[in-house]
Image (cartoon, grey):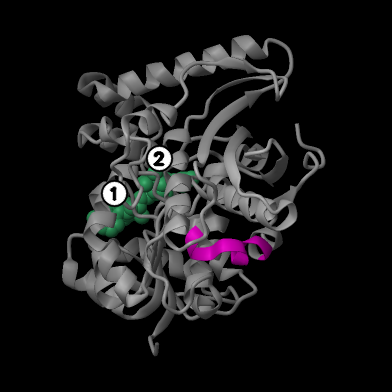
Amino acid sequence: MDRRYDLVLYGATGFVGRLAAAYLALHDERIRWAVAGRDARKLEALRTRLATTPNAPEVVVADSTDHAAVDATAAQTRALITTAGPYALYGDAVVDACVRQRTHYADITGETVWVRRLIDRHHAQAERDGTRIVPFCGFDSIPSDLGTWLLVRHMQHSLGASTVEVRAFFRLAGGFNGGTLASNFARHALGDAARSRDPFLLDPDPRHAFDEIEANLDPTGPHFDPHLDAWVAPFIMGPINTRVVRRSAALSAQWGEAYGIPFRYQEYTQFGGPLSGAKSAAVSVAAALFDAGAAFAPTRRLLTKVLTPPGQGPSELMMDRGWFRTELRGRTADGRSAHALISFSGDPGNRATLRMLCESGLLLARHADSLPGAPTRGGVLTPATAFGDTLVPRLRAAGFRIEVGEARAAGAP
Ligand SMILES: NC(=O)c1ccc[n+]([C@@H]2O[C@H](COP(=O)([O-])OP(=O)(O)OC[C@H]3O[C@@H](n4cnc5c(N)ncnc54)[C@H](OP(=O)(O)O)[C@@H]3O)[C@@H](O)[C@H]2O)c1
């Protein structure tokens, strides 16, 4: 492809977008790239700030409501990554343009119902064209999806067995961005919340038997896990990540690379230290109260006024102090097990997310020919099915710890 840019970063003036722009500008890999978005003045200011960096960007202006401008933006680049969200509000024109222009695409959405609509609209065409459309390339859902993929492959190669169950346990510290809160509120305002409860929402064919749905419903409430010897509660991002992992398993099965049949996946927050039972109960109650508040229009309006607005996020200090640790435990049908660990020191929703998105974008922009299934694989993919282990060395170089093995991962809880 002979295009003006390797990569366009769309939504570059938002909170994650600005951080991602700074990361790409200082990246060792030299690229031809542009920062893009709706506001020419803000984009010029960003370009001026990055002008003396080794990878200084150009500027492209395209409001998401100007379909011709978005189309022209997608036509100029090999790959486009976007942080312009809520995606249900600003994302359609961008993905539509990328599919039309056969431009590889990645984002950091967690909006599962919006992605279901993308699958219905675009999967078949993108699959025919070999265009990779890869949502969920942030904290939701790369640790879950890549971690599971690595664990399943490890169990196939080292134990010679397929995996029937993976459970992921998260521990983390970090803050919420205004953009993330806005996306959650938009999900309720658009009436997407009920549909997002379908455990197989993102499967190629989301129709499943009643007993399969029952067996895969999201966990509710805290409980003591005797195998882990710890209290756990439902993980707040579980209703996003589990759908993505199940889509990876279903796509892999279609390609003759099934994870395991049946294959079950669930996620939890893990608590340690004194009063961990009480902490897990408090977190479950707080999450349920927040969700109820976001679902009801008057309280949603109030929360919108008092919580962090779009464009803002955690302080530098809070991002420095943030971290996450995802431990995944896999099991074969005959009871053998293996573990994987993915962790990062730095705020999950920003420091970790921008790295995962940018490294995904660089793979699509510069290394598409060495991705799994290249050159023909395309469609609305998941991080695991789009990138497989090509992401691992890049994420390690970006500061992530990634381990997989039969023994309990070193240092794991
Ligand atoms: N997966 C994860 O772990 C993760 C983590 C963090 C965030 N996120 C998601 O990422 C998204 C961005 O988060 P954020 O905190 O960076 O949000 P943000 O600061 O509010 O940024 C939103 C961006 O969208 C742009 N935008 C708004 N309307 C537009 C339009 N009509 N045309 C083009 N661009 C438009 C904004 O442009 P202006 O600058 O001109 O206003 C801004 O650049 C959200 O959807 C959030 O949920 C995901």
Residue at 48%, 81% in the rendered image: 32
Residue at 50%, 50% in the rendered image: 138
- The answer to if 386 sits in the magenta stretch is yes
Identify residue for label 2: 180
Judge whether 118 appears above or below 5 on screen: above
The x, y position of residue 22, in whole percent, is 54, 62
> Which image quadrant: the C terminus?
top right
Which mark sits nearer the N-terminus, 1 or 2? 1
Label 2 Cα crowd, 10 Å radius (few <14 / some 14-19 / many 20+): some
Q: Is mark 2 within 8 Å of ligand 1?
A: yes
Classify residue 301 as left or right of residue 312. Answer: left
Write down the region rendered in magenta. Answer: 385-393
| Residue 116 - label | 1
Q: Secondary structure at mark 1?
A: helix
Q: Are marks 1 and 2 in contact (CB under 8 Å)?
A: no
The residue under label 2 is which amino acid type?
Thr
Q: Nearer the viewer, residue 349 or 209?
A: 209
Q: Secondary structure at mark 2?
A: helix
Q: Nearer the viewer, residue 327 or 155?
A: 155
Magenta residues, dominant SS class: helix
> Which image quadrant: the N terminus?
bottom left
Q: Which is in the foreground here, disc 1 or disc 2?
A: 1
Judge whether 138 appears above or below 266 on screen: below
Q: Nearer the viewer, residue 281 or 71?
A: 281
Judge whether 51 appears above or below 262 on screen: below
Q: Nearer the viewer, residue 102 or 145?
A: 145
Q: Is mark 1 within 8 Å of ligand 1?
A: no
